[in-house]
Image (tube, rainbow, N blue to C red):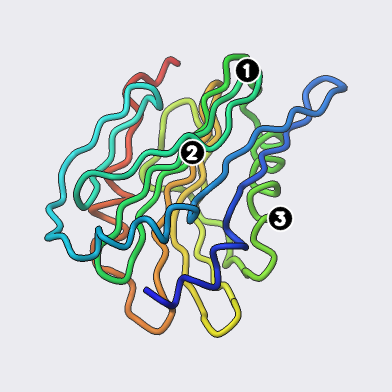
Amino acid sequence: MGEFRHIQPYLRSYICTVGKEGSTMRKLLSGVLMLLLAAGPLAAQTSEWKQYKNTNGNFTVQFPGEPTDTVNKTEEGAQSHTLLAREGAALYTVVYTVMTSEQKVNDATYQAFKTGVFNELPKCEASAEQPASPVLEGYIGHAYRLSCDMPNAKVAIVGNLYWGKHYAFAVMTMFPASVAEPAVAEKTFIGSFAVIDAAK
C-alpha cells in the first residue's frame, strides 16, 4: 500500500461550503485517508463483504469487513465521520456529515458542496459528471471518476457525492492507477449504498 502514502496529505479533508441566505456555512468532511497508516493490519485479514448499517449517518452499505469509524470534526450544528475499510490495494470509504439545520437541496447548494470537495483535491482531474447510481430520494447526487497525480504515484478514485437536507455523503473507492479497478467497486460497494429514512 505504499502507493497511497503520498496522497494522504492531499485527501486529508473535504471542505463543504454552502451559501445560505447571506451567510456562508462551512462544514468539514475530513479524513478520507487519515486512517491509512492505522488501516495496515486490515490488509492481512480475509475480507468478507457484509451489510453495514449506520443509524447516526442514516445509511447502509456493504463493506469488506468491519470498517473503522473516526469522528473527523464536530462543529456547532454538524458532525463529520469517516468510515474506512481496505481490501487488497483498494480503500473503500464513506465520509458523511450530519447537519442539524435543514439545508436547501438544489443545484446551487450541491455545486458549492462539490466545489468544496474538489478544491481539496488539487492534483486530481475529474471526468464528466454523471448521474449517481443508485439514486437517493431527496438527494442530489452525481458520480465521478478522478485521476490524481501525486508524488511517485497515480491514484484513481471512483464514487458518488450526495447532498441532502441533513446529510452529505462521499462514497468512494480509491486504488492505485497501476492496477485494475476492483470489480466490486461499483456494484458491491457503491451500488449498495442506501439511506435508511429518506424523509430525514
Q: Which quarter of the picture shows residue 29?
A: top right
Q: Is residue 159 left or right of residue 187?
A: right
Instruction: Give the structural element (helix, strand or loop) at label 2.
Output: strand
Q: Quadrant of the N terminus?
A: bottom left
Q: Is residue 184 above or below residue 70?
A: below
Q: CA distance from mark 2 to mark 1?
A: 16 Å
| Residue lying farthest to the right in this orientation | 22
Relative depth, front residue between 140 and 114: 114
The residue at which mark 3 appears reads as 119
Q: Which amino acid, mark 1?
A: Gly
Q: Residue at x 34, y 57 (%)?
A: 39
Q: Looking at the rendered structure, which numbered label has been put on residue 169? A: 2
Q: Looking at the picture, how far across and down is residue 82, in whole percent?
A: 45, 42
Q: Residue at x 42, y 15 (%)?
A: 199
Instruction: Give the structural element (helix, strand or loop) at label 1.
Output: loop
Q: Which quarter of the picture shows residue 74?
A: top right
Instruction: Give the structural element (helix, strand or loop) at label 3.
Output: helix
Q: Looking at the rendered structure, which numbered label has been put on residue 55? A: none
Q: Looking at the rendered structure, which numbered label has been put on residue 77? A: 1
Relative depth, front residue between 76 and 99: 76
Q: Is residue 5 left or right of residue 123?
A: left
Q: Which amino acid, mark 3?
A: Asn
Q: Is residue 128 above or below residue 195?
A: below
Q: Is residue 103 left or right of residue 141?
A: right
Q: Residue at x 58, y 54 (%)?
A: 12
